[in-house]
Amino acid sequence: MSFTMVVKDEASKIETTRLEDISELSAIIRIAGNINNNINVTIENNAVARRVFKLFKEIYGITPSITVRNKKLGKGLTYILNINTMVKDVLEDLSIIDNNKYLSIPIIIVLVIIVFLLRRKKKWKKHLKLY
C-alpha cells in the first residue's frame, strides 16, 4: 500500500469537529468535484468515498447516489458520488458559491486544514518511518 493510500485511509478514520467536517467536505468538492446542476465527486479511495458519503449524510441529511466504475487502465475502482438535491444550499454553506458566483477558498478553511494536520502530525510520523 502506498504512503498516500495509508494517509488517506488513516485521515478518513479520524474523529473531527463539525467545523473540520465542513472544511474537509468543502476542500474535497473543490478538488474532486464537478459542479453543474448537481455535484459529482469522483474519488479513487474507498475509505475517502465512505467518508464523503458520511459527511453529506451527517451534515446535510443527504444520501448521495454512488456509481462504482473500473479505472480506465483496469487497476482499481473509481467511486462517483452524486448529489442532486439542495445543491445551491450545500455549495453556499460550504462557501463554494455566493449569489451564483464561485468564491475563492476562504482563509478559515486553510487555517482549519493546517490545524487539523498539525494535530495529527504525531500519528503520521510512525508511517513516515516505514518509507
Image (tube, rainbow, N blue to C red):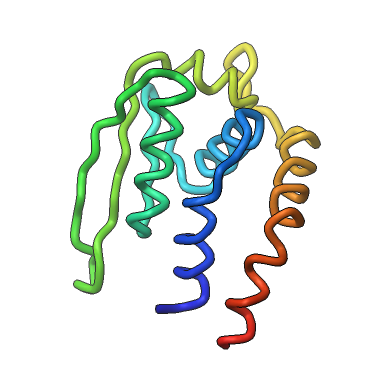
Q: In which quarter of the image is residue 100?
A: top right
Answer left or right for 70 relative to 93: left
Q: Where is residue 67 in the image (x, y as percent from the top left)?
A: 21, 43
User: Which residue is located at x 50 percent, y 20 percent?
Assistant: 90
8 over 127 or under it: above or below: above
Answer left or right for 1 relative to 124: left
Q: Where is residue 10 in the image (x, y as percent from the top left)?
A: 50, 60
User: Which residue is located at x 28 percent, y 56 percent?
Assistant: 78
Q: Quadrant of residue 76?
A: bottom left
Answer left or right for 129 relative to 121: left
Q: Quadrant of the N terminus?
A: bottom left
User: Which residue is located at x 31 percent, y 33 percent?
Assistant: 82
Foreground residue among 92 and 10: 10
Q: Quadrant of the C terminus?
A: bottom right
Q: Where is residue 2 in the image (x, y as percent from the top left)?
A: 45, 78
The total number of labels drawn is 0
Q: Position of residue 49 (x, y in %)?
A: 36, 47
Answer left or right for 82 relative to 15: left
Q: In which quarter of the image is residue 98?
A: top right
Foreground residue among 5 and 35: 5
